Image: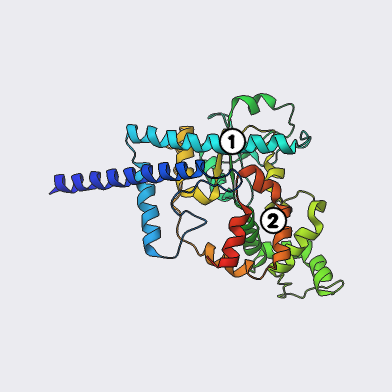
Amino acid sequence: MATATTAMHCLFIAICTISLLLMASFLLDRNQSMSPSSRSFRYPATAGQHEESKSDTSITTELAEATSLLTPSTALELEHIMGQEQDRRKRTLAEECRRINPSEPTGNYRYLHVNDKHKLLFHFIPKVSSTTWKTILSTLNNETGNVKPVLFNYKQDDARLKSYRKVLFIREPMSRLLSAYLSKLRNRSRLQRIWERSYGSDISRRYRGVKNQTLKEGQWFDITFVEFSKYITDLGSGFISNDITDHWLPQYKLSRPCHVKYDFIGHFENLAVEGPFVLRWLGVDNIVHFPEYHSSNAKQQFLKYYKSISPDLMRKLIDYYHVDYRLFGYSPDDAMSQVLQGV
């Protein structure tokens, strides 16, 4: 009985593994036939894009389990597929960097963290699963239990920029913006109070015509997503990087991908697959494991809030994030079509 059970388990793993590899190969072939501006590598539904249905969640879980139990031969094949996709992402990035030709950075890299033991530089971006990655890095830095900031000076730390492996995860800009709004301006928490004290009065003055509005205990500004979006597009480049604005500033301004040659560029939308993969690629999956992601209503939330955004404001948001879209291979048309078609 035990032998039969073991055999069935092995057969299940093999089927899931083959399915994963065939799906990845098909998607890669499809990407190669698309234009660089519109294609984006897609794995099975992941953290930011789960459907509510039980079937989608179970399929993702099965594929994730199969990925974690790959045999040496299939692991090499998956590594080859992932390598091709990384080459495509980095090639797109390099081409766009040549077109944009940004100036050399002079400030610090406040989100680029180091693990000297594993010769790793990991760049966190707020609202791109940064809490998860900080927990993982804290586990790797078990000597102190802390995540260490690094590269306060671009020139002095040039050696580690060249020799250490560098990892960056990024996210579709519209999805990240909405995530920042929901987590910081709609949760009735201490963080919402801090954000409202910093920007609520100015937003109220600009879009509600209320000057010097003060709130009593228990009152909230309740900034709407439309007001928040208008505020960002109206001020545009006028924002200075800080602990709050970094949650919506374009990701290229935080990560400087045209100057830091990242070895692995991950997509938040594919986190359930790319998270565990990058840990294996780094050789630390025996020390720390990527946590399981559960289904969410991200798609429904996206449609709900962006339907309130006018086409004109949507175009302004796309323009605000246009460099992110170009550098990282996302398509603004995808966001527009989701809202217009409700899918």
Q: Which mark is residue 318?
A: 2
Q: Can residue 83 be seen by looking at this rendering?
A: yes
Q: How far apart in space, not on screen, are marks 2 and 1 (Cα)?
A: 22 Å
- Is 79 above or below relative to 127? above
The residue pinned by badge 1 equals 90
Q: Can residue 143 be seen by looking at this rendering?
A: no
Task: Give neighbour class at mark 2: few <14, some 14-19, many 20+ (Cα, 10 Å).
Answer: many
Q: Secondary structure at mark 2?
A: helix
Q: Is residue 318 left or right of residue 337?
A: right
Q: Is residue 160 left or right of residue 55?
A: right
Task: Give neighbour class at mark 1: few <14, some 14-19, many 20+ (Cα, 10 Å).
Answer: many
Along the viewing direction, whichever of 170 and 219 lies nearer the viewer: 170
Q: Amino acid at mark 1?
A: Lys
Q: Is residue 135 left or right of residue 332?
A: left
Q: Where does residue 6 sit, x and y in percent of width and height?
A: 20, 45
- Is 192 above or below relative to 158? below
List the single residue furthest toward the right.
Answer: 211
Who's the residue at 69% across and 62% down the image? 314
